[in-house]
Image (cartoon, rainbow, N blue to C red):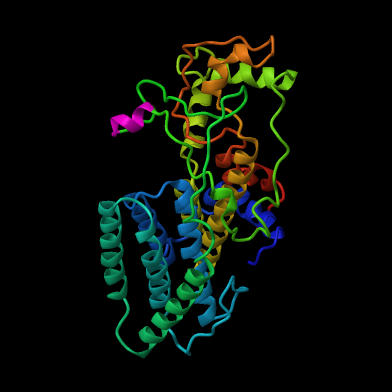
Amino acid sequence: MYANPKLFSRFALLIGSMCWLAVSSPGTSVRANEVADWNIAALDMVVAGGQNAIIASRTLAMMHLAIHDALNAIERRYEPYLSEARAEPQAAPEAAIAAAAHDVLAGVLPSFGKAEQRAKATGMLESTYTAALAKTPNGIQKNHGLVAGQVTAAAMLRARQQDNALTTSQYTPGTAPGRWQPHPNPVPANPAVTDPVMAIGNLAAVLPHWGTVTSFMMAIPWQFRLPGPPPLKSEQYARDYNEVKDIGGKSSTERTAAQTEIAKYWYESSPQGWSRIARVVGAHRGLDHWDTARLLALVNASIADGYIAGADTRYFYNFWRPITAIRAGDTDENNATAPDLRWESFMNTPSLPDYPSTRSVAGGGRGRARSGFRD
């Protein structure tokens, strides 16, 4: 689980198999699994703590990699990601899981969100931790488990202390054709946004420095930097422009019901969505703590690296969003792109450059790997 590009193919194999696995073994019994429980709890905490999906991907990767290492310190079934520490004999796995998760989250949650959000998330964490510890009888096994989790969490926090996640960078939106600039959401916002200021859109770029964050498994953030989007004057650009204009608009009459559902699905695709799929797979397959920890660590570390690599490519090319491009179609010097000044997107547009789609990065391995999976 080190910085090895081969791990992306392993992740693709896992993701590509998830939906198939979930329906291929309906008779498998579902067992209690503290690793999955912490995944659910952590997802609630990062939302309460004001972390967006990009930041949350780092938090979840850190937590699940620490849990993975804690369990493998107790019983070495898989190669550890970071910590080579060995636990004392008979250490309780449940205590190790709880300590690793708690200490990583306790180190990360205070760094993001508003004061009230941080306080809420921290309160959720402590109550979850107390409840988790109550499930394991007091004694030497519990103590050894706690130490195992604390050691791997501390190693993870040290390793990520200077990973650039907390830095900021100067970013100036573009003004030339093809360059990203702040843009509005559809009216009304879809999905609904409770904050009326946020609902309008026209927000500053999200995390323009994220492409400099230290990756989890890639050697460097730009290891897989993509070639650029099609030139504005090209036939491919015009074809893509008009397809999005016709199908992706709020008032489109050409978008089918199936395409609408697909759009909603990919809009939700995120650490939350893929973690949920992984939990379903793990439950249906009856995975134990070690295998669940490995699955969730691979899934979330790959998503985190996908966001990092995506940010590198996004801000390198700084390509405009359809909402901007379609309203300014008369500025791109392409005769096949007629502008529509009233065009609105079907769903809200995230405030960051268009290319590439990191939601697709998070799930793109699924279809590619399905035919190659063997149980």
- Picture residue at 68% right of the left edge, 14% below the top: 333
Is residue 254 rendered to the left or right of residue 43? right
Magenta residues, as a range?
194-200
- Comparing 359 with 350, the one in front is 350
- Numbered marks: total: 0
Task: Provide the major secondary structure of the magenta segment.
Answer: helix
Q: Can residue 326 be seen in this view?
A: yes
* Residue 64, position as x, y percentages in the image: 49, 64
* Residue 54, position as x, y percentages in the image: 49, 48
- Picture residue at 55% right of the left edge, 65% below the top: 294
Queried whether the magenta region covers residue 198, the answer comes back as yes
- Comparing 111 with 27, the one in front is 111
Position above or below: 178 against 41: above
Position above or below: 40 against 205: below
Q: Can residue 374 be seen in this view?
A: no
- Picture residue at 69% right of the left edge, 13% below the top: 334
| Quadrant of the snapshot with the C terminus | bottom right
Which corner quadrant of the image does residue 295 belong to?
A: bottom right
* Residue 72, position as x, y percentages in the image: 54, 77
Which corner quadrant of the image does residue 243 belong to?
A: top right
Position above or below: 199 against 370: above
- Picture residue at 46% right of the left edge, 23% below the top: 346
